[in-house]
Image (tube, rainbow, N blue to C red):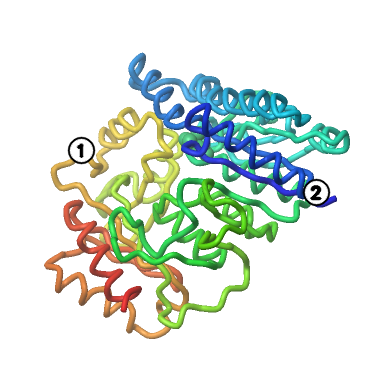
Amino acid sequence: MSVIVQKYGGSSVGDLTRIGRVADRVVAARQDGHEVVVVVSAMGKTTDQLLAMAREVSDAPPRRELDMLLSVGERITMALLAIALQQRGADAISFTGSQSGILTNDRHFDARIIEVRPYRIEDELARGRVVIVAGYQGMSYRREITTLGRGGSDTTAVALAAALRADRCEIYSDVDGVYTADPRVVPGARHLPALGYVELQEMAESGAKVLNAEAVAFAKRERIQIHARRTDDAHGAAGARETVVRAEVAPSPRRVRAVVGDADVAWVRGAADHPAGFDGLLALAAETGVPLRAAEWTSAGASAWVSLPRVPDWDRAAAALASAGLTVLDPRSSDAVACVSVVGDGLTEDGGVLRDVLSVARAEGCAPRSVSSTPFRITLAVPRASADPLTRALHGRFCEG
Ligand code: ASP
Ligand code: MG
């Protein structure tokens, strides 16, 4: 029998009615003759609420205790879904991440999966049961409970799909896949029926709130095909769209596939004569538990970017970086910056795309604070207020018409 892994995001399991609807879908997949593993997120905004509670108690909650707290969100959903399935006469059992054999490193709040030993899941599937797994969590080799970074239920789903050699991994949410830009910012954003791993990974790492970046990296490594769909679309229903993520996708004739804005970032800089130098900046970031999205050194100084959702205790970390003499710009700063990235393939083949990006920025009256480019991404750091208009203008230039 073929195994499929289905993952349901927070809004798809936001209340009991929706959990019931998910149960109906799982029953249908089972009746189609699949062995089904269901990975669930925490209900609605539960994770944000738990995090806010911890931050009310302390401005720097210990990350170990945050993991104990946040991992509860997914446990609530997994148990309720298993109950709903049994109520429908389906044989189902729920497992936490550690029961599912998801082993991680010991980095709390942002752990990485190092191995999956899904023996218990395989046993239960062989007994004919549907297995529900709490997403976003694992157990470190020190037997500590860890979480996998925000949006980490995607990672759980892809990792399990790989370990179980599943036929496919279906990711359900309130959107029908991936768009050329965030439709809330760019009204003309277009749906992408197919997308390559590299482009999606660049989008996720640029801050697109689509799939978790680590999940895409995992899928790329293990060659897992991902189907991103809307939960409310009945399978095969007329007009239902999806995005399929896989290795081979015809290159976009325009080279640019998507435009991504991200204001949830901090920019950390050290002057050229900063005594600690580039190594010092990197060492300090590691010491304060701040993962860097990108870092660069030139003779003018060192600079690094931080994705803020990855740092639960940013206030403490920012204070430590600032007291070491580094300049820290974050969303609270009066001159806060945001990143706007153009994602695609072959972007630096000739200077044409880069030149067009700069001329669009100029026409928008937007003076970038920094510009960087690789064949897959061009990123501009711009004043926060110009990020959305620039995103729309770049999308208009490269992805519309
Ligand atoms: N509940 C976690 C979060 O909100 C994980 C997930 O939803 O994938 O980040
Ligand atoms: Mg969530």
Q: Residue at the location (65% across, 45% down)? A: 6
Q: Which residue is more in the foreground, 268 or 361?
A: 361
Which one is nearer the viewer's eye here, 397 or 282?
Answer: 397
In 3D space, how far apart are the residues under numbered discs 1 and 2 (Cα atoms)? 53 Å
**Dot 2 lies on which element?**
loop
Q: How many marks?
A: 2
List x then y, in percent, for residue 108: 54, 30
Q: Is residue 308 visible?
A: yes
Q: Amino acid at mark 1?
A: Arg
The residue beneath circle 2 is 33
Q: In the rendered structure, which amino acid carries the disc numbered 2?
A: Gly
**Nearer mark to the viewer, of 1 and 2:** 2
Q: Is residue 213 left or right of residue 236?
A: left
Can you tell which quarter of the image residue 374 is in?
Answer: bottom left
Give the residue at mark 1.
332
Q: Quadrant of residue 52?
A: top left
Neighbour tally class for label 2: few under 14, some 14-19, many 20 plus, Cα within 10 Å: few
Name the one closer to the observer, 18 or 137. 18
Q: Which residue sits at x=30%, y=69%?
A: 395
Closer to us: 142 or 303? 142
Tell me what residue is drawn at x 27 percent, y 79 percent: 356
> Is 35 on the left or on the right of 395, as rendered?
right
- Where 352 sits versus 379, above or below? below
Mark 1 or mark 2, earlier in chain? 2
**Is the C terminus in the top left, top right, bottom left or bottom right quadrant?**
bottom left
Q: Is residue 224 above or below residue 64?
A: below
